Amino acid sequence: MVGHTLIILTIIFFFLLNFFFFSFSSCSLKNFVSNVFLEEDLLQEPHAERCGSCHKDIHKDFKKSRHAVAWVAEHFKKESKNYTDEKCLPCHAAKPIWASSGFQEEPELREKHFEDGIYCVTCHFDPHRKGMVGPYDVWSPPHPSFQDNKIKSAELCGVCHQETYSEWVEAKVDKTCSDCHMPKIGRKHLTQKPPMSWFHSKKEVSSHEFPALIAKKEDIKIDLLRKDGNLILQLENIGVPHNLPTADQGNPKLYIFLYWEDGEKETIVLSPQKENSLEYKKPISFVFQDKGLDMIEIKRRLSWKEEPELISSLTYGKD
Ligand code: HEC
Ligand code: HEC
Ligand code: HEC
Ligand code: HEC
Ligand code: HEC
């Protein structure tokens, strides 16, 4: 009797297993799991914190970025006249920038979560495909994901960084904005929420702090020419494939200080607002009465920083 029951149970078991495989085989098994684990609110453009419940480390980095404060930054609040100057608002709290093909030409102002500034949803959520666009082919049951190399393109950044983007196009280089401003940071996991995070293969993570970086000494070539009692200083940006400094609305500055042997000092200020930035590979010259050059210092000041930072310092005199 016991033997019979066992045989019948075994047959039922295999029948059910077969049924399961026929119904959910290959692709549809994945779909089935995805539907069970789908978290609907992720497709309703939630705030950054929500994405951060799984993408913990990326969210932590993002919070340190200027994008995260694009709306709440003091300068912006003041200069947009307390958010009343409407033309200022879209780039500082944009809706998703994906269009039905490629990107929107102009960003649009969203209706919620203003204080998140330029956040995850702005860059990753595609309302047309209804899912997240990213660089990898992933299996992400909580939300659909689409691998699309356009995420790495300069066009994405250019939706808002319009001036800088056109300078970059002129420079004709292969490196894109994210190659430099989103360096790989050696971390290997996209999510930090078990159990799902245990099963995912390793993938390179890019910096979501979006560092402004700082030019290297070699990026700015300095030539000195002496003629008829004059000193001609020639500067050329040979390393950064957009203007130095560059901006759409901010007011960053590049300072060149010349120290003469008599202790006097001369200052050149370059800025996008004065339209005299150093364009990529286009040298510019300044003529001075030669009083014996002691030292040149180059510093830069970002729009939102109080203090300038040193790029290079070169000593010439008395050797
Ligand atoms: C086309 C998109 C766009 C529009 C429109 C725009 N901004 Fe910006 N804004 C940017 C970008 C990009 C930056 C990043 C730095 C830069 O390139 O200037 C920025 C940076 C800034 C900064 C410097 C950052 C800081 O916190 O100090 C201020 C201030 C600012 N914007 C104010 C404004 C004001 C005021 C307006 C309206 C007159 C405005 N923006 C309209 C894209 C835009
Ligand atoms: C419940 C957890 C969870 C939440 C919340 C979540 N994700 Fe994900 N996400 C995942 C998983 C799992 C993956 C795949 C990870 C892997 O393969 O290592 C993923 C992958 C991604 C990728 C990579 C896609 C690719 O093709 O390269 C992006 C981009 C992304 N998510 C954006 C977001 C955004 C934006 C939000 C908020 C609207 C969000 N995620 C919220 C779990 C989550
Ligand atoms: C939807 C609009 C938008 C998009 C898209 C965008 N940015 Fe920005 N970005 C801004 C704004 C606005 C600021 C200024 C925030 C502030 O400082 O108040 C900014 C600031 C920055 C800064 C800091 C500049 C500084 O002065 O410190 C960097 C670097 C940057 N963005 C790089 C990028 C890169 C790289 C991309 C593409 C991967 C990108 N941005 C895409 C709007 C955008
Ligand atoms: C200004 C646009 C922008 C914002 C804001 C942004 N990302 Fe990204 N993200 C990118 C770009 C561009 C890449 C691809 C970088 C590459 O592969 O070179 C990327 C890559 C990713 C990846 C794949 C792993 C990696 O680092 O390459 C995940 C996951 C991701 N982002 C999640 C998020 C989450 C979560 C947030 C919000 C906390 C966020 N992103 C905010 C532009 C953005
Ligand atoms: C080859 C690397 C490289 C590429 C490509 C690149 N940048 Fe930069 N970027 C830099 C460096 C280095 C600086 C720092 C300049 C300095 O010393 O102030 C910088 C500075 C900036 C700043 C801060 C303002 C300033 O002038 O300091 C913004 C905003 C910016 N880049 C946006 C972009 C955008 C948008 C793109 C793509 C269209 C891009 N960058 C492409 C290297 C790069």
Image: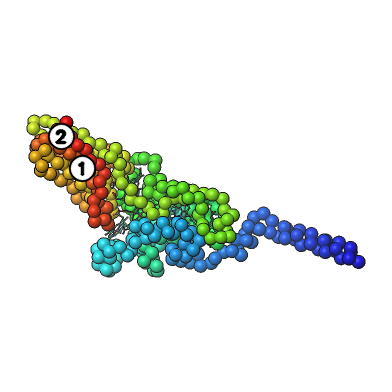
Q: Is mark 2 within 8 Å of ligand 5?
A: no
Q: Amino acid at mark 2?
A: Gly
Residue 13, image x and y in percent? 79, 62
Q: Quadrant of ligand 3?
A: bottom left
Viewer-nearest residue: 151 or 208: 208
Q: Which mark is residue 274?
A: none
Which tag, 1 or 2, sits closer to the chain's start? 1
Q: Is residue 221 left or right of residue 208?
A: left
Q: CA distance from mark 1 to mark 2?
A: 13 Å
Does residue 125 show up? Answer: no
At mark 2, the secondary structure is: loop
Q: Position of residue 48 (x, y in %)?
A: 43, 63
The scheme the figure's colours follow is: rainbow
Q: Residues within 10 Å of mark 2 (few under 14, many from 20)?
A: few
The C terminus lies in quadrant:
top left
| Above or below, comparing residue 308 to residue 49 in the picture | above
Does 122 sit left or right of 222 as displayed?
Answer: right
Measured as percent of width and height from the top left, residue 142 is found at 55, 62
Task: Tell me the residue that label 1 is attached to.
Answer: 297
Residue 13 in view of the camera: yes
Looking at the rendered structure, the kind of residue marked 1 is Glu
Q: How far across and down, in percent of the image, does residue 61 sit?
A: 41, 56
Which image quadrant: the N terminus?
Answer: bottom right
**Is label 1 in contact with label 2 (beta carbons under 8 Å)?**
no
Q: Identify the residue shown where x is 35% and y is 51%.
A: 211
Residue 65 lies left or right of residue 265; in this view the side is: right
Callout in the foreground (1, 2): 2
Q: Nearer the viewer, residue 115 or 106?
A: 115
Residue, disc 2: 317
Task: Indicate the quadrant where residue 262 lies.
Answer: top left
